[in-house]
């Protein structure tokens, strides 16, 4: 027994051996800092990515725009995987401008105007009432030219380019949703690297469950016939004629100018859409342009100039954000100037045609975007209504959430597949490594461009600086890679207090603020800063207990000093004039920050900002904490940007003043800064007031300043840069000429994070395992059971939609029955809205707090009248009984069949035996008879052959003798001829000898 | 050999004519760029793109709508002024010609500076000074190698017309003419870089080594120079080989074609009849005679080579004059375009002028 145990243990050890062999590689990861010692970034051009990664020259490519066909090939290549994340949006923006604007005295409504103009009201999208010369005047926009005009009407504008603009009619725009074959384009053009969108919000947005039922009403399927039918009715009503397959208005074709971008998948989808429009009868003039030419033509021209009718728009997406109202504000409202006319005062601008509850999309966007709400519910309501208005107005036909693609060697470990930023997520460089190696090679499209600048004012405007820089410093707060929620990174959010949205908190007497007029910190109350909406307390210990890359300890003075310098740059009029670009971005943020208070390792930030989620308030307040550079380097930027004016801190200043755009990683700029330190221009005395709280000693001493300057010099001599920060890597080489940079691991023992601390791995999205849909009694009660798998707090939403009318008949949240099981209870209130004998679609959307991107499943339910369901129950019971009886009968029948089969088998065996005997006898007789016949036949054939042979032999003998005779004769003739020839030869020889003899005689005689 | 007055007058006349040609070329280019609205269209789209991005940035920072409008307008105004769109086209292009002569103009687009790995502010002269050595190393050097091979070999194969070597070289010329240079470049990157692993796969670092070499030269650091040269050689041998391989065929064929006419002349036959060695016949009676025309197309070819090869430079990620030209044209950087036209025309004209002098000096018939 004991031996058996020992043996079992040995076997178990042997089995576990391969597992342990992996452990040392992981165990070798350092305790502090990132997972690898060195990260090398260099430029790899897009066409070369495939060759570089398959040859192992790079371990990953961080620029996410590799072509989809390359991505598909690489994904199928052994040893390489392709990470993708939703990174862009594609839509078709339509030009809704009128072709004619007329005016008429008086205040007339749309129908009256239509009557007086003699046109169908469908031709008039909008009437506007204005006062001209003290009298009311009605401006009328027309989608088709009306000529001649009735008395009193006069032209304000009339297009000389086109006679009819179908996209001016909202119903036509809406119908175009049905001719955009989204499924096919995702499949054939994007090769799966895109998700379908019917609105600017979709399954790629964390906010989707809140608006899903609104969008579900408009989940447009490709239905060309429907669109054609409806557009035909509208066009005919508007006065157009369908002649020979083409729409004609006032004798001219209805022209559509399609601006199609050529650089990416939009070329094919634009062509596909143009083709659908041709099939609808429009005269499409496709114009395929690149980025610059296209945006100039679309965004640079007045919509009523009709330089374009539709344009294949593309947008980049920011990171994942749990509560993001940006899409509504940008794509459906006038708020940010993205509706046709683009907010340009001199252009015709689109004005909303629709409202819900008396408010248009812009009003709802303002509520959601500028937080002009009092609760989360109000915010969501605004978002929903704005979204619906956006779909109904259809200025944009939404198509896809496109995905960026990042190829990575399959053995790269420690990655976080950020649902928003993909491989570009700053979490990745902290954990990435390949077992057995201490470096990582990263390819990027560029490392340096003239717009690439590493400075903390208005630098970091491109991915080429942002991507590597995020590996060099730590954030205060960042977004969770899967939920999109703000999470503390290198601070601890001690508390968030708020009196918002309407109340205020008292700012304490010892809170301070920087007075840009006097260049010093003062009590905040001195500046009238007495109230704030919210207060956030941050614990800064993780910074304060560690060192900057050059070895000096991080100080509270670094935070105060940097904040003071940024405030000075914003509110000092002279500085604001120099770098107005910085002010335009910083001021709206700093305007909301009221004061700060330092208490031990804590900083309290008072802000005039409210959000229904407290972490969003903390995130906003963190704007007051500048943490990426030591104070003296922020001061150095201030000096060269504002004092000596040798460098520009923003691109626009660089252009306007013809100054180099400051970048602390460039040797020339670093050298300038070091020289200014050494020469004493960037001095302690000049900047000490920025780190001195009112009535207190400076937070950075003169000695510390001197030590830091020496450390900067030494750092510059070693690396050629002065980008010195506090994150997991330091920049130790930057070569703009080589397009190469090297990041070296920060192994300072005071650095708080290890290589595994920020590795989130891959999101495990919620999975809808099954949806059990019973028959639904109408009216009555039914439960739909949804089984899900996933982590975190899972929520399940449902939407019941009539597929014929596309109306949403019910929506809500499912109830959790037990872990992983949810129930959608359809009670009488719901079912009474359903029609019997109908099939309804149930959209089931599941989401979790951990993974904010939702999943969706669609099932169908059948409704029946409640009575019928009751009867159905009885029928089911009878059917069950019948089934049971049938089973009994089946069993009896089976038995009987077995018996009969057995008997039949026995009888068959006897019969077969008898038959075989008979057959055997018959075959034997037949064989005998056959052999006799064959024998007789053989004898006869032999005889015949013998006769034939003798006849033939005789004939051959005769022929032979004849041939022999003939040959003999020929031989005789030949012998004779030969004899003659011999004689002739002898005579000829004699003649020749004679001839020679005669010639010899003649010659001797001479 | 001292030149007589007549020769000097002829040379001066040629000099004036060529200078006038340069002026006319520049004027025409300036007018084409300005009057057609070519640069204006591109600049306007650039402004609109930048304003849009600016507006988006403000929106992301939740700046109030009115403020976005005001700031965007200000920004647009600034950009219009920066790009000179507030000035008429003739001020933007023609009036700057005097400054162009000394290359005292600025690159007006980031993309143009960016392809060279530089940033603005950047004078057009500095941009050309950076791009030109790169092109000279890859293209002009390869052209020189090809010329050095073809000058002795061309007449020789003409002399051996119809031989196996002659046929082989004709076939080689046909093949290299048929294959695009950029395709050979791609093939070579794959073959030498990825497959054989004897050359780099990314050639851009040569830019840094050229810079290091220049720095070492200024500081007279011999070891630095040698080390930089070794790196330059490592990074440049494949491009030089490829360009030489591609241009040699055409050059050999051209020299051969010129030489064939001379080879069939009576005096060459007479020289051979007198029993002179073949080498001597080629050197004295063929090479000397064809020197004029061969020198003409080789010098003009060398002058032309500084214009760079756009696609080949891109394949090797080796931004020289070709890529600079292309970027300047595609971004509408009219000042850079004018500067490039000026420099390439100037080099061409100087080459022509040198040839004119050589003609006058070497060939008395030119004086007639």
Image (cartoon, helix red, strand yellow):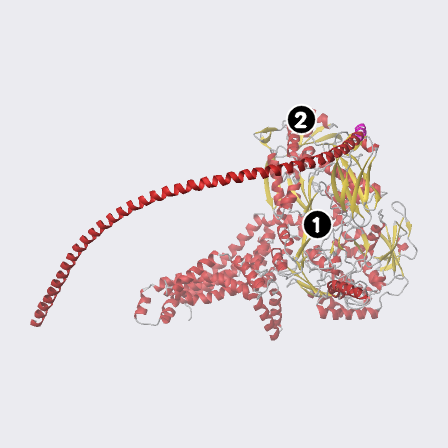
Q: Residue at x 44, y 60 (%)?
A: B173
- Tag 1 or tag 2, which sits nearer the N-term? 1
- Label 2, residues with CA under 10 Å away: few <14, some 14-19, many ≥20: some
Question: Which residue lies under the disc numbered 2?
Answer: A119
Judge by depth and name the residue closer to the eye, A109 or A1001. Answer: A1001
The answer for which chain carries disc 1 is A
Cα–Cα gap, marks 2 and 1: 46 Å
Part of the protein shown in magenta: A865-873
Q: Is residue B147 above or below residue A396?
A: below
Q: Residue at x 66, y 63 (%)?
A: A740
Q: Is residue A903 above or below residue A622?
A: above
Under circle 2, the secondary element is loop
Under circle 1, the secondary element is strand
What label sits on residue A894 in the rendered view? none
**Residue A899 part of the magenta segment:** no
User: Which of the 4 quarters of the picture holds residue A514?
Assistant: bottom right
Spot occupied by residue A350 in the image (x, y as percentages of width and height): 71, 38
Spot occupied by residue A583 in the image (x, y as percentages of width and height): 77, 53
Instruction: Using the rendered image of the protein, determine whether residue A301 is visible from the camera's viewpoint.
Output: no
Question: Which residue lies under the disc numbered 1?
Answer: A87
Instruction: Using the rendered image of the protein, determine whether residue A700 is visible from the camera's viewpoint.
Output: yes
Judge by depth and name the residue closer to the eye, A911 or A854. Answer: A911
Type of secondary structure dominating the magenta stretch: helix
Q: Quadrant of the N terminus of chain A?
A: bottom right
Q: Is residue B8 above or below residue A389?
A: below
The answer for which chain carries disc 2 is A
Judge by depth and name the residue closer to the eye, A183 or B152. Answer: A183
Spot occupied by residue A411 in the image (x, y as percentages of width and height): 69, 60
Extreme-left residue of the structure: A1005
Judge by depth and name the residue closer to the eye, A755 or A737. Answer: A755
């Amino acid at each position: 027994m004991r031996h058996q145990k020992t043996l079992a243990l040995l076997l178990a050890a042997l089995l576990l051996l391969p597992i342990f062999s992996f452990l040392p590689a992981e165990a070798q990861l350092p305790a502090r800092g990132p997972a690898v010692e060195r990260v090398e970034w260099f430029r790899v051009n897009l066409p070369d990515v495939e060759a570089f990664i398959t040859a192992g020259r790079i371990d990953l490519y961080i620029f996410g725009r590799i072509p989809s066909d390359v991505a598909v090939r690489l994904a199928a290549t052994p040893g390489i995987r392709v990470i993708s994340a939703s990174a862009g949006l594609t839509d078709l923006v339509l030009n809704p401008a009128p072709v004619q604007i007329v005016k008429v005295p008086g205040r007339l409504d749309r129908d009256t105007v239509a009557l007086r103009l003699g046109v169908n009201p469908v031709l008039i999208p909008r009437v506007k009432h204005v006062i001209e010369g003290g009298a009311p005047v009605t401006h009328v926009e027309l989608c088709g030219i009306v000529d001649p005009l009735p008395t009193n009407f006069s032209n304000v504008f009339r297009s000389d380019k086109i006679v009819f603009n179908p996209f001016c009619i909202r119903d036509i725009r809406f119908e175009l949703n049905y001719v955009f074959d989204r499924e096919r384009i995702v499949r054939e053009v994007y090769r799966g690297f895109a998700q379908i969108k019917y609105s600017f919000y979709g399954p790629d947005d964390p906010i989707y469950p809140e608006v899903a039922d609104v969008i579900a009403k408009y989940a447009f399927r490709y239905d060309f016939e429907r669109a054609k039918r409806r557009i035909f009715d509208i066009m005919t009503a508007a006065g157009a004629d369908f002649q020979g397959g083409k729409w004609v208005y006032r004798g001219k074709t209805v022209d559509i100018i399609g601006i199609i971008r050529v650089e990416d998948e939009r070329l094919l989808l634009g062509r596909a859409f143009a083709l659908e429009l041709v099939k609808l009868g429009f005269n499409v003039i496709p114009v395929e342009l690149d980025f610059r030419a296209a945006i100039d033509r679309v965004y640079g021209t007045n919509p009523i100039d009709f330089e374009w009718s539709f344009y294949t728009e593309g947008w980049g997406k920011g990171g994942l954000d749990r509560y993001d109202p940006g899409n509504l504000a940008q794509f459906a409202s006038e708020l940010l100037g993205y509706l046709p006319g683009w907010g340009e005062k001199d252009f015709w601008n689109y004005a909303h045609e629709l409202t819900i509850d008396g408010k248009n999309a812009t009003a709802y966007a303002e509520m959601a975007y500028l937080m002009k709400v009092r609760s989360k519910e109000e915010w969501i309501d605004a978002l929903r209504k704005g979204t619906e208005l956006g779909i109904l107005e259809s200025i944009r036909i939404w198509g896809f959430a496109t995905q960026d693609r990042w190829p990575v060697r399959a053995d790269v470990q420690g990655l976080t597949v950020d649902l928003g930023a993909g491989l570009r997520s700053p979490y990745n460089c902290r954990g990435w490594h390949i077992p057995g190696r201490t470096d990582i090679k990263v390819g990027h499209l560029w490392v340096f461009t003239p717009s690439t600048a590493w400075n903390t004012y208005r630098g970091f405007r491109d991915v080429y600086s942002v991507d590597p820089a995020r590996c060099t410093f730590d954030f205060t707060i960042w977004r969770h890679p899967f939920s999109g929620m703000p999470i503390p990174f290198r601070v601890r959010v001690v508390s968030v207090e708020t009196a918002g949205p309407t109340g205020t908190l008292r700012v304490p007497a010892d809170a301070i603020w920087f007075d840009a007029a006097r260049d010093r910190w003062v009590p905040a109350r001195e500046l009238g800063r007495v109230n704030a909406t919210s207060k956030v307390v941050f614990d800064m210990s993780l910074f304060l207990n560690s060192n900057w890359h050059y070895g000096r300890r991080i100080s509270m003075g670094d935070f105060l000093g940097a904040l003071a310098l940024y405030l000075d740059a914003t509110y000092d009029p002279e500085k604001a004039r120099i770098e107005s670009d910085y002010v335009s971005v910083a001021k709206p943020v700093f305007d909301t920050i009221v004061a700060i208070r330092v208490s031990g390792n804590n900083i309290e930030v008072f802000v005039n900002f409210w959000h229904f989620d407290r972490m969003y308030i903390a995130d906003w307040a963190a704007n007051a904490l500048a943490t990426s550079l030591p104070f003296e380097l922020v001061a150095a930027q201030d000096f060269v940007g504002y004092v000596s004016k040798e460098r520009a801190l923003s691109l626009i200043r660089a252009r306007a003043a013809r100054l180099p755009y400051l970048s602390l990683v460039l040797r020339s700029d670093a050298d300038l800064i070091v020289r200014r330190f050494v020469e004493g221009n960037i001095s302690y005395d000049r900047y000490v007031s920025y780190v001195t709280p009112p009535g207190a000693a400076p937070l950075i001493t003169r000695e510390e300043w001197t030590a830091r300057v020496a450390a900067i010099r030494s750092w510059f001599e070693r690396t050629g840069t002065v980008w010195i920060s506090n994150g997991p890597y330091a920049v130790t080489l930057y070569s703009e000429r080589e397009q190469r940079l090297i990041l070296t691991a920060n192994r300072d023992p005071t650095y708080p994070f290890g290589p595994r601390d920020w590795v989130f791995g891959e999101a495990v999205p919620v999975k809808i395992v099954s949806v059990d849909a019973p028959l639904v009694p109408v009216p009555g009660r039914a439960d739909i059971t949804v089984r899900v798998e996933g982590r975190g707090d899972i929520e399940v939403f449902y939407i019941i939609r009539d597929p014929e009318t596309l109306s949403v008949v019910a929506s809500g949240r499912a109830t959790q029955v037990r872990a992983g099981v949810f129930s959608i209870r359809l009670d009488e209130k719901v079912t009474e809205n359903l029609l019997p004998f109908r099939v309804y679609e149930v959209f089931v959307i599941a989401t979790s707090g951990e993974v904010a991107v939702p999943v969706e499943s669609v099932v169908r339910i059948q409704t029946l009248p409640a009575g019928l369901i009751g009867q159905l129950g009885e029928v089911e019971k009878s059917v069950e009984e019948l089934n049971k009886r049938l089973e009994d009968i089946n069993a009896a029948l089976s038995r009987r069949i077995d018996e009969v089969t057995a008997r039949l088998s026995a009888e068959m065996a006897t019969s077969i035996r008898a038959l075989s005997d008979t057959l055997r006898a018959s075959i034997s007789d037949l064989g005998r008879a056959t052999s006799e016949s064959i024998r007789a036949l053989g004898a006869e054939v032999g005889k015949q052959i013998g006769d034939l042979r003798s006849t033939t032999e005789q004939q051959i003998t005769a022929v032979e003798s004849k041939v022999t005779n003939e040959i003999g004769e020929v031989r005789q003739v030949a012998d004779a001829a030969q004899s003659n020839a011999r004689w002739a030869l002898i005579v000829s020889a004699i003649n020749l000898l004679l001839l020679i003899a005669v010639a010899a005689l003649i010659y001797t005689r001479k | 050999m001292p030149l007589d007055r007549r020769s000097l007058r002829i040379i001066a006349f040629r000099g004036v004519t060529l200078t006038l040609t340069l002026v006319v070329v520049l004027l025409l280019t300036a007018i084409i760029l300005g009057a057609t609205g070519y640069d204006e269209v591109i600049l306007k789209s650039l402004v609109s793109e930048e304003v849009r991005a600016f507006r988006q940035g403000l929106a992301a920072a939740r700046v109030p709508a009115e403020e976005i409008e005001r700031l965007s307008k200000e920004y647009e105004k600034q950009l219009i002024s920066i790009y000179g769109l507030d000035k008429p086209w003739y001020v933007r292009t023609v009036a700057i010609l005097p400054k162009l002569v000394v290359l005292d103009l600025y690159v007006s687009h980031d993309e143009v500076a960016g392809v060279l790995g530089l940033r603005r502010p950047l004078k057009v002269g500095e941009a050309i000074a950076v791009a030109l050595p790169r092109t000279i190393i890859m293209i002009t050097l390869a052209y020189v190698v090809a010329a050095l091979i073809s000058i002795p070999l061309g007449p020789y194969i003409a002399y051996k017309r119809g031989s196996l070597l002659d046929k082989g070289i004709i076939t080689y010329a046909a093949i290299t003419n048929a294959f695009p240079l950029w395709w050979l470049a791609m093939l070579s990157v794959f073959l030498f870089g990825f497959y054989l692993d004897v050359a780099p796969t990314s050639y851009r670092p040569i830019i840094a080594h050229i810079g290091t070499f220049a720095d070492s030269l200024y500081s007279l650091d011999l070891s630095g120079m040698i080390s930089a040269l070794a790196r330059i050689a490592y990074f440049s041998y494949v491009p030089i080989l490829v360009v030489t391989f591609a241009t040699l065929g055409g050059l050999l064929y051209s020299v051969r074609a010129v030489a064939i006419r001379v080879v069939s002349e009576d005096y060459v036959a007479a020289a051979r009849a007198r029993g002179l060695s073949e080498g001597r016949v080629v050197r004295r009676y063929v090479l000397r005679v064809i020197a004029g025309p061969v020198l003409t197309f080789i010098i003009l070819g060398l002058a032309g080579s500084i214009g760079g090869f756009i696609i080949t430079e891109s394949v090797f990620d080796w931004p020289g004059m070709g890529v600079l030209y292309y970027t300047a044209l595609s971004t509408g950087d009219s000042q850079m375009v004018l500067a490039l036209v000026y420099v390439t025309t100037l080099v061409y004209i100087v080459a022509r002028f040198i040839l004119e002098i050589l003609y006058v000096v070497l060939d008395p018939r030119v004086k007639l």
